[in-house]
Amino acid sequence: MIDVFIAYSHFDLSYKDELKKFLRPLLREERITLWDDFDIEAGEDWNAKIKERLYGADLVLLLVSADSLASEYFYSKEVKVSLERHARGETKVVPVILRHCDWTATPLGDLEVLPEKGRPVVDWPTRDQAFLDVVSGLRKVVAGLELKRKNAGAEAEAQRQFQAACEAAGHLYEKKNWREAALAYGSAVAAYRPGFEPDVNSLKGRLAECERYIQAEKDAEQQRIQSEAAARKEQEKREKKPAPQKNYQVNAPSKPKEWMIEVPEAGSSSTGTSNRGFWLSIGASALLIVILVIWRPWSGKKDVGRVPNTNENTTQPNKGTEPATMPENRQTVPSQPGTESTKNPSVEESERRLTQKRVADLLKEANAYIQLDEKPRARITLQKVLLLDPNNAEAKTKLNSLK
């Protein structure tokens, strides 16, 4: 079959479609194949595909009008290549004059044109008459090409296919489309025969160069994938790494203490806060002994140096009466009912300072629990502070914030 290439301007699309309708009988007879740029599939390089089909066509139809001659691609690419191949005898170029234009002043003026005598299609009484004349002329051209091909044999066909593959491969190489260029150069090498130009060694060199570029792209892609995988792995490692624990020197009790004095456990080797609690308990015990010695509730005699109080109950305790014990949640010892405190001022000051120190320590301990987000222990510790100092504003504020 004769391969027909149609070159036109998109402003003449309706004329092109009309001409293809009139060429349909030749298609059914399987004497020709038709191709134009509307046959380019999605994703294909249209410029490379046009060159491949143009260089491989047996017959080129140039649809001529003012718009097509004004098109840079039509005149400088398609017309130029077609006329060069026509001059070498590789193809047949037939201009089809659609509308009035100055085509006679171009290289097309040296060729036989259709319709008859170059009468534009628009000047015919109807388009049907004009295109019928065009198809009649094309049937003669097709018959001549069929006879020429029969005489030329397979050598000319191989030359045509080789040239088409070389042109497409060269275009793809210039655009750095290495994969498709490698396929095109492979087709050109397969179609090569001695005496064809370019030489097969130059084609193989281009093919090897394309393969090197393809391998380099594969290596770059593999390196990119490995880098992204390493970055994701490092990110996952950072996300799984636990946050550093802050080291607070806090003697955190495992459960609330009913009594505010902390006594170290037997056999404990802890230092720091546990030693402080131990010495604090020793001091509190000593203070308790001093208070009991001064008070002496079990003695019926008045304490030496004590000033009698007229409102004090002078009834002596019975012999079986046990000494007064400390209240469950108090560190200070209250006066007997109906009596006034007879403590030594220095003892009261010592007791007050001891209470203040204990309050400050408990507030520090509560702050540490808050930072560790251990709210239950923090609340218990703040409640201890309020037992010692019911008017402590800081303890009240923090306790309210933990509710």
Image (tube, rainbow, N blue to C red):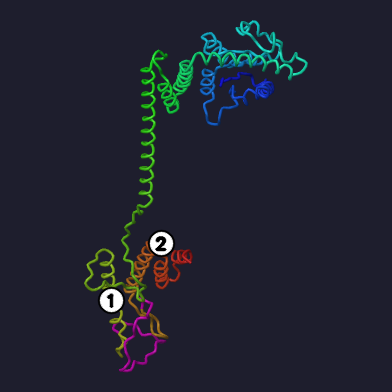
Q: Earlier in the sequence, mark 1 or mark 2?
A: 1
Q: Which stretch appears magenta? A: 303-332
- In the picture, the quarter occupied by the N terminus is top right
Horizontal and vertical percent position of residue 26: 63, 22
Magenta stretch, main secondary structure, is loop
* Residue that mark 2 sits on: 373
The secondary structure type at the circle numbered 2 is: loop
Residue kind at label 1, given as amino acid type? Ser
The part of the image, by quadrant, that contains residue 198 is top left
Q: Is residue 124 magenta?
A: no
* Left or right side of 219 for 70: right
Q: Is residue 237 visible?
A: yes
Horizontal and vertical percent position of residue 167: 47, 18
Depth check, front residue: 224 or 329: 224
What numbered label is drawn on residue 171? none
Depth check, front residue: 403 or 50: 50
Q: In percent of the image, x 64 and y 19: which residue is there?
A: 9
Horizontal and vertical percent position of residue 122: 74, 15
Please determine whether, in this image, residue 13 is positioned above or below residue 368. Answer: above
Please determine whether, in this image, residue 68 is positioned above or below residue 345. Answer: above
Q: Is residue 35 visible?
A: no
Residue kind at label 2, given as amino acid type? Asp
Depth check, front residue: 163 or 301: 163
Depth check, front residue: 275 or 65: 65
* Left or right side of 161 for 242: left
**Mark 2 nearby-residue class (10 Å; few <14, some 14–19, many ≥20):** few
**Mark 1 nearby-residue class (10 Å; few <14, some 14–19, many ≥20):** few
| Distance in Å between CA atoms under marks 1 and 2 | 34 Å
What numbered label is drawn on residue 285? 1
